[in-house]
Every structure is written in C-alpha cells, then in structure tokens.
C-alpha cells in the first residue's frame, strides 16, 4: 500500500509532470509534425532534379501488361525505341523490374503489371516492349505498343522439344507444331553447355514450313550433347523450346523453355508538368464542387434529423454513418461498378454505367466519401441551437424559411466551417478509393493523390520518379492548407444571411409541396447517390462468375497486417493523444496552448498520400537514425494522420465540461493522476472511444499513406487495389465485402462500448 502511494506521489510530482508533458510536445513536434512537412525541404535540396524532371520538357509513359506466371521468372525488361516494329536487342533498355539486389521480393517483382517510365523527351514518339527473362537467361518479348496503338507482334508460344533419336552421328529431333500466325521459321541449335541460350550456340538447321516439326542433323557427338528449337516469326521476335540432351538425365522439358509470351495491354504518355498540373486541378475542382453539393443537400437532411420526429429515424441515422465503415478501396471499386463504363466487367442489373470521365466519376465518388461528414457536422451544431429563436421569429410573422434563413443559419457558421474542412480534407486526401475507381474504368487521368500513389508504386523500380513525386506532394500540401484557410475565412467573415427578406416568395416556399419536394429530393440523393453506389459491390459479387484462382492466403495475410497496424496505431495515438488534448484544454498558458491547437490540425489537413511520402522521405534519409523497416514506416505514417482524431475529441470533450469537478477533487487532496482517472476520464470516455473508433477504422482502410511510404507492404486495401489493377475483379469484389464485414463488426462493437461508456 505504501509502495503504491509512493509511486503515485512520484508520478504526480511537478517535475515528473513537466517531463511527461515535455515528452508529449516533443513527440508531436519531432515525430508527427516535422516528418509531415519534411518534404518541403526537398524544394531546396532537390530543386535541380525537380527542374530537370518536371520543368525539363520530359514526359512519363504508363505501361500495363498481363503479369507473367513463369516459375523461373527473373525479371522484366522495359525496352523503348523510336522505330516501329523494333526487336528489343536493337533498342534501349530503360527500366528493369527485379529484386533490386534483395530489397524487393521476387514475387513482388513477378506480380508487377504496371510501370511508369520517366525522363523521356516530350517531343519524340516512342514504342515499347516488355521482355520477360527467366533464371536460365531465356526470354520472350511482348507485343509492341505506343500511344493510341493497338497491341501487335507478340513473341510466339514456345514449342516443346519432345524427343531425340541418335543413329551414328545423326540426331533426329521431334517437337510440337507452332501455331503462330506470323510464323517464319524453326531454328535448331546445338551446344555442349547444359544451360545454353540459342544466341550463344551453333545453328545447325533452319526450317521454314511450320508443319515440318522434325529434322535430322549431323553433329560431332563427342562435342554436342544439348539441343533447343527456336520459333521465329516475321517480326523478328522469337521464343526458345525446352532443352533436351543425349545420354544425360534432363529436367522436365517444360522447365527449360522460354517464358510464356505476355501481352502489353495499355500505353499512354503525358508531359510531366502537364500531368502534375492536371492532377492538382482535378483534385481541387472536384473537392470544392463536392463540398458545395454536400452542403446544399446535407443541410435539409440534417434539419430533418434534428428538427423532426418520424418512424425509422434511428435507421436513417445508421444508414448515413454506414459509408464511414466501408474501407475506401472497396467503396471506390463499388462506386465505379455502379456509375462507370467498365470494359470487360459483367455487372448486375441496376448499374447506371453512364460515364468513363475521370472528373465525373471522382465527383460522384467523393460525394459518397464526404457526405456523412457534412451531415454529422451540421446536425451536431443544429442540436445545440435553441429552437426558441425560430419560434420567436415566427411569432413575429416570419415564415419558416425566413426564420431559418435569418435566425438559425447565422448560428450555423461553426457547423459549416467544420463540415467544409472535414469534406475538403477527406476529398483531397482520398487515395485508395480513387485509385480503385480509376483503375476500374481504365482511366488515363489521375488526381493528385492517385498520381502520388501511382508514382510511388512505380518508384520502387524507378528512382527517377522521386523529384516529380516530391514536387506534387509539396504543391498539394501548400495548396491544401491555403484552401482550407480561405474557406474558414470566407465562412466566418462573410455575413450570413443577406438582410433582405422576400416576404411573399419565402411564404410560398414555406408551404405546400415545396418543403416536401425539398426533403424528398434530399433523401432521394442520399439513397441513390450515396448509399446504393457504396453497397453496389454486393450485387456484383452475388451475380459474377466465381473465380478459382484467388489467393486467399495472401488476402488473410494482408488483413492480419492491416489489423496489427491499426491496433498498434490506435494504442500509440491514445497513449500520446489524450495527454496532448488535456494540455491544450487545461493549460494555463493559453497562447502556447492555442499554438499547439492550430499545429495539431496540420496532419489532418495534409493529404495522406503527400504525408506518407514526406514521412517516408524523412525516416529513410535523415542522418541521425535512418529507418527502412516497412511496418515501422507505415505505423508512423498512420500515427501522424490519425493523431488529430483523438486530440480533437479530447479537447472538445474537456471544453464542454465544468472544471468545478476537477477543482473539487484537487481540493479534497486528489493527485493529478487520480483526478484524471476518477473524474476526467469517466466524463470524456465516450469522446475518447469515438476517437479510437475513428483512428482504428481510418488506419484499417488507409491506402494512400501506406503506398506513399512503403509500396512493398501489402495491407488489405492495397491488396484490393492490386487485384483491380491486375483485372481480378471478382476476387477484388469478394475481398472488399470481407473487409467491409470485418470493419462493420468492429464499428458495431466499438459503438456498443461507446454507448455503454456514455451511459
């Protein structure tokens, strides 16, 4: 007992408290805020690279292909040429996708089905091929592709060398018939090297007729033991058969043949600066329009939920919150299936499928993401506004519309500011859902966060993309902060509403069918623009043809990683965010607390894709303690953007509580730790649990920061995006539903805990 009291006295001592809060402030400044904004330093340290890659009249080329499943895969080679019909041996090798000396797993390299090539002169037209090379040095070449060009000239399928028959010094070879439409010839090669590649061996025969699939050659059997057959097509591309030997034990013939030919499916190029400015413009235009639509439609719904009582009100409240429980990658895929024109995907009845425009699809998608934030912000403020003000105005002869517009709306400023900032922050930050949606409609356009995510994924094999990545991140961070400051100033400084009253018009609009049509239109919008697209994926999976090739082990592994990261992140944020909230709300140094209050909002405002890239740049390049562990980098990125959720909830709860209870406890001799545990925490438990829910679910569903900080790590949302990119739509849909169900169960459990805590 005495030991416990001594420990309590020690922990509650002034020096220990000061040291603890100093640590909390340093953690926030050095571990959260500094890494969040660290990318800004690249404007000085890497400006020459930015000038060369972004402003140097260069372009990037995006290439998509069908991934290769060869068991002996070693690498992809990306070859470019200015000559149409080129063979890779006569072209420029611009990029290699391999293990990077062990930094990348072989499976990660093999499963790549996309890359972005940078540093290409913008004025030239280039043609591309992908060569897949196996561990024995054999290869096949993809078709040739350039912008707006159909796929053509794929390497032929390899033939199988079936048998060798020896009679004297004559060897008879038999192989399967080539069915290549562009067949030119068979070439028979011989060597005494058991691992030979035909280009380094002796050509002993050439056959120009595809149906002649055998030959007899004369060789010196004391020097030659091994044979291969090469199939050559008219374009000059070829593939090599398996290797067979005389009088030796050979491996399975299929193991020694060239890899199966692959198909380069899409290619498009764009000048770098044009791509960056276009992506930034798309992000901000969509964010502003979506926020305005959320405000216009969300206000009537918030009004009905607060001011009116009707049957099923609790269910409507639940429905509005449901999109928050859906991981964004799953929601992006679902909305794209509902609204988008999706080549090669059979969709169930009910899909609108009217657009392949990136702008239109992203606008609709961002409304789905952000609408609940606006409704909840407006409803929370409306609940605090005394309805008696409206009653008094109406008693003086004002119509319902006039009373609401001139009396209640001015009191809405804080709700509008909160809703606008939440919606803008969400729409500017969203990455996983955007990448899933754009990949589903095979769009050639990106918004800023999708461009960061795509470039970061490609930079795993192409370091030359880093300057462009840094430039996009810097501009996105600066413009986001400026925009949100402008929005806050406009809403708080502009006088609302206009003083003029249109008596007759507003009386007519307050009666009859108009109010009913307004409410009906708002709920129609909620149903068919927000909820149906969000859950359309269930209908797709129910009607799609099941696939037998899904790697569910990889999915459950990625889901386990996501849960582990979200759990660790939530624990760290709770332990270090609650003290920061107490410091801001209860500090006697109001100016210092006010500065911290403003700074805490910055990680929330900064788009997560830019934040992730900045944090990864900080931890991997700073000289004091460089860190390259993927899980650590992801945890720190998630801590940075979720930290404000707990702090803001704690500050809001404490500011609404009467400090008399705490003062009384101190007067009765309670130590600071006892005051927190027995007085403060029980009263703010619901807010803390709400912050924990937001932290856990946001971390669980985050894609942008994860990709930006570590493209090698495969969390569940990243796994879904990769499935969509590779065309595995059924698996992506089923994985999305599983992730939705797991997330929804967690939200229900935590909401139950929140309800009990608030009871």
Image (cartoon, grey):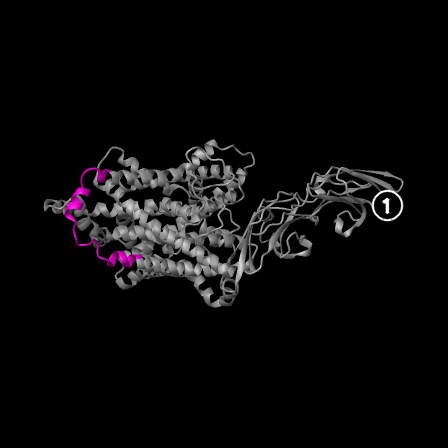
In the rendered structure, the answer to whether residue 577 lies left or right of residue 586 reads right
As for residue 508 lying within the magenta part, the answer is yes
Image quarter of residue 300: top left
Secondary structure beneath dot 1 equals loop
Residue at the spot x=77%, y=47% of the render?
194
Residue at image mark 1: 219
In the rendered structure, the answer to whether residue 428 lies left or right of residue 675 reads right
- State whether residue 750 appears in this view: no
Pinpoint residue 575: horizontal percent, then vertical percent: 37, 52
Count the marks. 1
Q: Looking at the magenta stretch, what is its main secondary structure?
A: helix
The span shown in magenta is: 487-516
As for residue 297 lying within the magenta part, the answer is no
Image quarter of residue 310: top left
Residue at the spot x=39%, y=40% of the render?
534
In the rendered structure, the answer to whether residue 326 lies left or right of residue 493 reads right
Pinpoint residue 422: horizontal percent, then vertical percent: 33, 51
Q: Residue furthest right?
A: 168
650 above or below 54?
above
Quarter of the picture containing the C terminus is: top left
57 above or below 530?
below
Q: Residue furthest left?
A: 396
Image quarter of residue 663: bottom left
Residue at the spot x=31%, y=59% of the render?
486
Pinpoint residue 92: horizontal percent, then vertical percent: 64, 58
Pinpoint residue 231: horizontal percent, then vertical percent: 73, 44
Check disc 1: other Cα within 10 Å, few if <14, some if 14-19, many if 20+. Answer: some
Q: Nearer the viewer, residue 294 or 34?
A: 294
555 above or below 101?
above
Q: Nearer the viewer, residue 757 or 729?
A: 729
- State whether residue 525 appears in this view: yes
């Amino acid at each position: 007992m005495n030991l416990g009291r001594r420990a309590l006295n020690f922990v509650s001592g002034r020096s220990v408290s000061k040291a603890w809060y100093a640590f909390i402030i340093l953690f926030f400044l050095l571990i959260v805020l500094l890494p969040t904004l660290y990318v800004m330093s690249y404007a000085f340290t890497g400006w020459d690279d930015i000038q060369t890659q972004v402003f140097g009249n260069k372009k990037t080329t995006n290439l998509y292909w069908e991934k290769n499943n060869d068991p002996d895969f070693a690498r992809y080679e990306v070859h470019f040429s200015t000559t149409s019909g080129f063979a890779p041996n006569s072209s420029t090798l611009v990029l290699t996708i391999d293990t990077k000396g062990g930094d990348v797993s072989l499976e990660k390299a093999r499963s790549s089905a996309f890359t972005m090539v940078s540093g290409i002169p913008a004025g030239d037209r280039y043609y591309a091929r992908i060569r897949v090379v196996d561990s024995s040095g054999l290869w096949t070449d993809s078709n040739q592709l350039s912008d707006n060009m159909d796929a053509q000239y794929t390497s032929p399928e390899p033939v199988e060398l079936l048998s060798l028959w020896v009679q004297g010094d004559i060897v008879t070879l038999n192989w399967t018939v080539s069915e290549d439409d562009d067949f030119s010839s068979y070439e028979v090669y011989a060597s005494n090297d058991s691992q030979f590649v035909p280009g380094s061996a002796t050509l002993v025969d050439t056959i120009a007729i595809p149906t002649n699939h055998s030959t007899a050659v004369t060789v010196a059997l004391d020097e030659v033991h091994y044979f291969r057959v090469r199939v050559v097509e008219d374009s000059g591309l070829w593939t090599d058969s398996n290797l067979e030997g005389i009088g030796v034990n050979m491996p399975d013939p299929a193991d020694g043949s060239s890899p199966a030919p692959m198909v380069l499916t899409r290619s498009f190029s764009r000048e770098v600066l044009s791509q960056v400015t276009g992506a930034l413009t798309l992000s901000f235009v969509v964010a502003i329009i979506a926020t305005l639509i959320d405000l216009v439609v969300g206000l009537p719904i918030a009004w009905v939920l607060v001011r009116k009582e009707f049957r099923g009100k609790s269910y409507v409240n639940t429905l509005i919150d449901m999109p928050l429980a859906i991981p964004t990658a799953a929601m992006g895929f679902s909305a794209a299936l509902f609204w988008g024109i999706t080549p090669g995907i059979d969709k169930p009845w009910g899909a609108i499928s009217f657009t392949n425009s990136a702008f239109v699809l992203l606008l609709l998608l961002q409304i789905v993401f952000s609408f609940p934030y606006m409704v909840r912000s407006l409803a929370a403020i409306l609940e605090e506004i005394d309805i008696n003000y409206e009653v008094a105005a109406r008693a003086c002869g004002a119509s319902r519309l006039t009373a609401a517009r001139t009396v209640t709306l001015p009191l809405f400023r804080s709700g509008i500011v909160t809703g606008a900032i939440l919606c803008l922050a969400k729409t500017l930050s969203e990455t996983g859902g955007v990448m899933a949606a754009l990949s589903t409609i095979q769009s050639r356009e990106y918004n800023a966060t999708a461009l960061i995510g795509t470039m970061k994924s490609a930079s795993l094999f192409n370091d030359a993309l880093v300057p462009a990545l840094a430039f996009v991140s810097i501009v996105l961070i600066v413009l986001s902060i400026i925009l949100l400051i402008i929005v806050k100033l406009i809403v708080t400084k502009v006088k609302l509403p206009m003083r003029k009253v249109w008596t007759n018009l507003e009386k007519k609009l307050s009666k009859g069918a108009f109010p009913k049509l307004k409410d009906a239109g708002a709920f129609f919008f909620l149903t068919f623009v927000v909820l149906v697209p969000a859950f359309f994926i269930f209908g797709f999976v129910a009607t799609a043809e099941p696939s037998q090739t899904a790697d569910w082990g990889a999915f459950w592994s990625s889901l386990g990683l996501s849960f582990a990261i979200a759990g660790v992140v939530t624990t760290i944020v709770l332990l270090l965010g609650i003290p920061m909230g107490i410091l801001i709300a209860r500090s006697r140094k109001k100016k210092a607390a006010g500065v911290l209050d403003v700074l805490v909002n910055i990680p929330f405002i900064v788009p997560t894709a830019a934040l992730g890239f900045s944090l990864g740049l900080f931890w991997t390049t700073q000289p004091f303690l460089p860190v390259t562990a993927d899980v650590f980098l992801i945890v720190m990125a998630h801590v940075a953007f979720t930290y404000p959720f707990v702090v803001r909830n704690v500050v809001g709860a404490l500011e609404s509580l009467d400090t008399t209870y705490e003062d009384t406890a101190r007067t009765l001799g309670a130590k600071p730790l006892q005051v927190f545990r027995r007085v403060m925490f029980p009263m703010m438990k619901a807010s803390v649990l709400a912050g924990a829910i937001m932290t856990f679910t946001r971390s669980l569903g985050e894609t942008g920061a994860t990709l930006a900080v570590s493209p090698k790590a495969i969390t569940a949302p990243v796994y879904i995006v990769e499935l969509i990119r590779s065309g595995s739509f059924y698996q992506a849909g089923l994985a999305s539903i599983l992730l939705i169900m797991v997330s929804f169960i967690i939200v229900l459990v935590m909401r139950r805990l929140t309800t009990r805590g608030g009871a």
